[in-house]
Image (cartoon, rainbow, N blue to C red):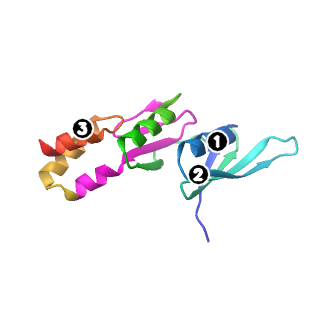
Amino acid sequence: MRASTFLWFDGRAEEAADHYTALVAGSAVLDRQRDADGRVTTVTFELAGQRCIAYNGGPQFTFGGAISLYLDCDTQEEVDTAWAALTEGGKEGPGGSLTDRFGVTWQVVPTALAELLAAADPAAAGRVLTAVHAMTKIDIQGLLDARDR
């Protein structure tokens, strides 16, 4: 048995899969299935080890914010790069969340956030969380400054 993320698109599955795999290191399109007219119906891809299936199912369903893709970033440069690529044509949200141009919600989070929260005393952790909630794109230096106040 294997679990995969299934993403329902209205005609943009191939574009989304290509965009995501170009952005995230260690990712690749594994398969493209086409209908009798040669149009792509399904794209199977791996996103940093996570198997995903993008399906051109039509307009019946749309994405919502209750589920999102979570992207761990090791550096501020990775956060900045992912944020720029995913918000292009999309919309910024609070605390590291965004909705990309395909309507998919993402959490773009530096690994430093979990490390800061785990190592901080309760007061410092509270300041870090308050700082995160005030940000759109998460800024690691801003988190460090909040911890040290």
Q: Which residues are magenta?
A: 91-118
Asked if the magenta segment contains residue 95, the reply would be: yes
Percent position (x, y) of residue 38? Answer: 84, 42
Local crowd size for mark 3, using a 10 Å CA cut-off: few (<14), some (14–19), many (≥20):
some
Local crowd size for mark 1, using a 10 Å CA cut-off: few (<14), some (14–19), many (≥20):
some
Q: Which amino acid type is shown beneath numbered disc 3?
A: Gly
Q: Which residue is mark 2?
A: 27
Q: Which residue is mark 1?
A: 18
Q: Looking at the image, which residue is at 14% across and 54% down?
A: 122
- Image quadrant for the N terminus? bottom right
Cβ atoms at labels 3 and 2 below 8 Å apart:
no
Sequence order check, earlier mark of 3 and 2:
2
- Image quadrant for the C terminus? top left
Cβ atoms at labels 1 and 3 below 8 Å apart:
no
Q: Looking at the image, which residue is at 23% across and 58% down?
A: 118
Sequence order check, earlier mark of 1 and 3:
1
